[in-house]
Image: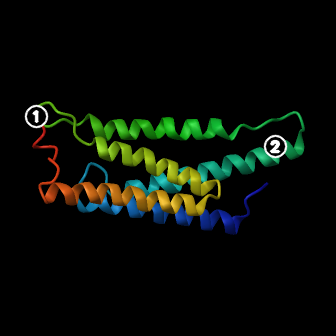
Amino acid sequence: MVVETTDFLLRVGLATVFGLIVGLDRQIKRKPLGAQAYMLISAGSAAMMILAMNYGAGAMAEDDAIGVDPTRVIQGILGGIGFLGAGAIISQNDEGRLRGVASGAAIWTVGGIGIATGLGYLIEAGFLALLTFAILAGFEWLQSKDMLPDENDVE
């Protein structure tokens, strides 16, 4: 099944908005990567997934011997995003503790949001974007109320 241009624009546009939802939390908190990076990761993941599906559908239509495995595209996208997440995590504070682990996890999650959006799972992707934002914002709120230690208080 080929994704038509209007559906492509809708899915990539929504992926961008979903990336913005997560990225705003990171931008406001001045974390390693801001909203722009999250938007690009989500939009790029959605676009790559759709393009791979369209290419596969076209190739299979031309030659019955060609098989397409979309899970390989997903693996490639998430593997590449892992490098971005690692870059956010590698930075250490003065005590040698890792910083940016939540940002690294959020980057990986935003890649999944983009993949889900690209595959047409729009409600699921939107839910995951809101859930990710709630987790990031919720932990910050709990830390601000001294209900959880922040990363500077952890021994």
Q: Is 116 above or below relative to 126?
A: above
Q: CA distance from mark 2 to mark 1?
A: 56 Å
Q: Quick one: SS at disc 1?
A: loop
Question: Residue drawn 22% across and 37% down?
Answer: 91
Q: For the residue labelled by badge 2, is the local secondary structure a helix, a strand or a loop?
A: helix
Under mark 2, the amino acid is Ala
Q: How many marks?
A: 2
* Residue 19 visible in the shown view: no
Dot label at residue 155 = 1
Which residue is depicted at the point 28% across and 59% down? 138
In the picture, the disc for residue 59 is 2
140 above or below 103?
below
Give residue 119's position: percent from left, percent from top: 64, 53
Which image quarter holds the C terminus? Answer: top left
Residue 115 coordinates in the image, percent (x, y): 57, 50
Is 45 placed above or below 39 here? above
Where residue 89 sits in the image (x, y, percent)? Answer: 29, 38
Residue that appears at 45% across and 41% down: 81
- Mark closer to the observer (2, 1): 1
Q: Quadrant of the N terminus?
A: bottom right
Q: Is residue 12 visible?
A: yes
Residue under the image location 35 percent in, 35 percent down: 86
**Mark 1 closeness class: few <14, some 14–19, many ≥20 residues within 10 Å:** few
Disc 2 crowd rating (10 Å Cα; few below 14, some 14-19, many 20+) is some
Q: Quadrant of residue 25?
A: bottom left
The colour scheme used here is rainbow
Foreground pick, 67 / 124: 124
Q: Which numbered marker is on residue 110?
A: none
* Residue 71, position as x, y percentages in the image: 64, 38
Question: Seen in the image, is 23 located left or right of residue 94?
Answer: right
Give whichever of discs 2 and 1 has the lower sequence position: 2
The amino acid type of the residue labelled 1 equals Glu
